[in-house]
Image (tube, rainbow, N blue to C red):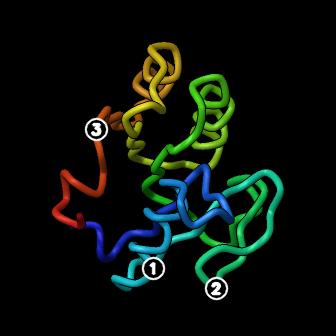
Amino acid sequence: MYENKTLVVFGVSQDPSKYGNKIFKTLRAKGFDVFGINPKGGTAAGANLWPDLASVPAKAEVAIMVIPPAALEDAVQQCIAGGVKEIWFQPGAQSPRAYELASAAGIEAVESCFMADNGLW
């Protein structure tokens, strides 16, 4: 279902024990077209990380949020500006206000685990 879409993961840490890194690494290993976002940049799983969505060199269709609730509203605003069609708010990365912002902008907002719900873990 997502194999032909460009995905971004907000909150990709360089620390391999963190979920953002694990999600990003797994999606890359499975051949997905995926970009990682970390405000500090850097690399993870052998790929560059981008400081924000506007820096990503492709148009993302799906965003996976693995960031603290306090950072979600800004990330959702980036997704609105970038034309993202679907946002997955991972467990622990949820905010009623961010969810409302996404929904009001016509973005499909899902509060669930992207990896588990799509049989990737």
Amino acid carrying label 3: it is Ser
State yes or no: discs 2 and 1 in contact (Cβ < 8 Å). Answer: yes
Q: Pointer 1: what residue?
A: 28
Kindly identify which residue carries mark 2: 46
Q: Identify the element where label 1 is drawn.
A: helix
Image x and y of residue 96, in percent: 44, 14
Instruction: Give the CA separation, mark 2 to mark 1.
Output: 9 Å
- Which labelled disc corresponds to residue 62? none
Which of the two labelled residues, at mark 2 and mark 1, occupies the earlier sequence position? 1
Of 99 and 16, which appears nearest the observer?
Answer: 16
Q: Residue furthest front?
A: 17
Q: Distance between the Cα atoms at labels 3 and 2? A: 27 Å
Q: Are marks 1 and 3 in contact (CB under 8 Å)?
A: no
Cα separation between marks 1 and 3: 20 Å
Q: Position of residue 46 (x, y in %)?
A: 64, 85
Residue 118 figure quarter: bottom left
Work out which quarter of the rendered image holds the N terminus and state it: bottom left
